[in-house]
Image (cartoon, rainbow, N blue to C red):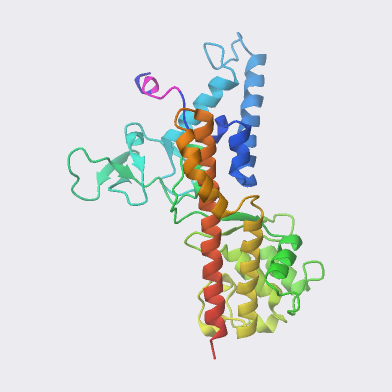
Amino acid sequence: APYISLLPSWFPGIPLFYGRDALQALQYPPVAAQVTKRAKFLHQFSTQLAAVRSTRRCPFRTDVDANALGWALSAVSSRAFRVNGPDHPAAMLPLIDMCNHSFDNNCTTIPDGEGGIKLVALADIAADTALLINYGALANDFLLLDYGFIDASNPHDYISLRFDEGLIEMARLLAGQMDAAFTGMESVAAWKKERLVQLRLLGPEADLEVRVGGHQLVDGRFLAALRILYATDAAELESVPFRDLGNTEPHISQMLCKEKEVQVFTTLVGAATHGLSGFPSTLEADRAALPTLKQSASDSVAERNVALALEFRIAKKICIKTAIQKFVNIATIRQQLP
């Protein structure tokens, strides 16, 4: 098909094609796990295809191995857009896919009313100016995995943490909160368990991934859980609607007492610090290494991938440090309340 013939023969920057050094350079297990998941899918799919090769059950007219499937998967992921947000299915948009991404975009996509998508300029655009669209409110995880690049100042970037007893205890230890009155996960009161189940942070349907960073600053479920765990009893939260427990800026009448609000946000500082400590290298060391690596990577795909992985983890560390400072600021403001 004409459209297929316009697609590139390879997709630089996409982690599916990284070597061991580049994958290790990411220093970020959630993305490495996604790469493994995609590679496993391609292997299983190619194995199934091999079993029906040269039969009517084969969906292709020629032999298709794992490498060809990897190319196809990357072609789709790098040319598809989540126009309705990261939690909605992606769609391929021929011609529009020639536009590069920017959060400071000069064009946008809108439905045409007939099942299609139109590209519309947001202002007058001078000749020879690149047409830029916003691929969506996506973290660098999505941008790297699907498109092969990152945005160093991505306002939607975040880190993922696993909500469990270990995270909470380490966060409290790093934040110097071990002496604060607190109910551990193992001995949590029945009313607290009920609310944690409602937050899907406990029970058979629990989703334990919580996020720190980005516009939201902290996953509302994580913040709500800490307020619940620091509360002395249910009466302490009677004035707070359940939906508002995860609000970073509630009305003063909907907060815990000043001391416990400070403990909550100080614990978030500890959680983010714990996330930062998971990286083997420091932000300062990464920044110092990047210029030399980028200079030496000009003629090597493998080294360019390592350099991109380094930029990815630098952005993650900046994201975490920014969140830590914001948590400190909020805790300071809470401390100054009457």
Q: Is residue 257 left or right of residue 75?
A: right
> Observer-nearest residue: 294 or 27?
294
Q: Would you identify the image quadrant in which residue 109 lies?
A: top left
> Observer-nearest residue: 100 or 40?
100
Q: Residue furthest right?
A: 187
Membership of 8 in magenta stretch = yes
Q: Residue at x 63, y 24 (%)?
A: 45
> Observer-nearest residue: 18 or 186?
18
Please indicate, yes or no, whether residue 8 appears anywhere in the rendered image. Answer: yes
Residue 97: horizontal and vertical position, in percent? 36, 35
Please indicate, yes or no, whether residue 14 appears anywhere in the rendered image. Answer: no
Q: Residue at x 44, y 56 (%)?
A: 155
Q: Is residue 109 left or right of residue 148?
A: left
Membership of 273 in magenta stretch = no
Question: Where 146 falls versus 323 (above or below)?
Answer: above
Question: Where 118 falls versus 252 (above or below)?
Answer: above
Q: Residue at x 44, y 53 (%)?
A: 154
> Observer-nearest residue: 90 or 289?
289
Residue range in magenta is 4-9
Q: Is residue 313 left or right of residue 138?
A: right
Residue 309: horizontal and vertical position, in percent? 54, 41
Question: Where 152 falls versus 11 (above or below)?
Answer: below
Residue 60: horizontal and vertical position, in percent? 53, 15
Report the quarter where the N terminus lies. Answer: top left
Q: Report the number of discs.
A: 0
Q: Is residue 36 left or right of residue 14?
A: right
Report the quarter where the C terminus lies. Answer: bottom right
Q: Residue at x 56, y 73 (%)?
A: 328
Q: Residue furthest top?
A: 54
Magenta stretch: dominant secondary structure: loop
